[in-house]
Amino acid sequence: MAWEWQFEKADGSTTEPSLAPGDFGTQGDAESWIGESWQELLSEGVDQVSLLEDGVKVYGPMSLHAAQE
């Protein structure tokens, strides 16, 4: 199984940041990476991400912006 992030703009269009990591061996590895990298992705113009397993969306889109109260 291959886990990967799909990087998106706010309108849902896909984008590729300079630090795109490729595939991960486990869901946990993918989620750990996004937890460490989300701020840099946001600074590059990525607004949201979706997690894919073998090309099938598991969840998302998940915003990288802070929640507004």
Image (cartoon, grey):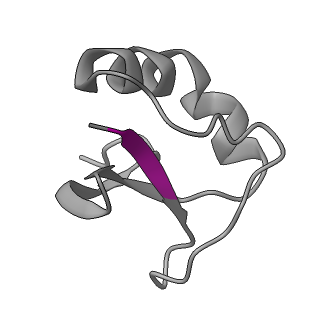
Q: Residue at x 50, y 37 (%)?
A: 23
Near-viewer residue (29 or 65) = 29
- Give the percent coordinates (x, y) of residue 50: 34, 56
Which image quadrant for residue 7? bottom right
- Give the percent coordinates (x, y) of residue 13: 54, 83
Residue closest to the far right: 18
Q: Is residue 43 left or right of residue 51?
A: right
Residue 3 within the magenta-colored segment of the rendering? yes
Near-viewer residue (67 or 44) = 44
Residue 10 within the magenta-colored segment of the rendering? no
Q: Is residue 33 left or right of residue 56?
A: right
Where the N terminus falls, by quadrant?
Answer: top left
Q: Is residue 50 left or right of residue 33?
A: left
- Give the percent coordinates (x, y) of residue 64: 45, 45
- Give the percent coordinates (x, y) of residue 33: 49, 20
Residue closest to the far front: 1
Which image quadrant for residue 49? bottom left
- Majority secondary structure of magenta residues: strand
Over which residues does the magenta segment extend?
2-6
Q: Residue at x 54, y 15 (%)?
A: 36
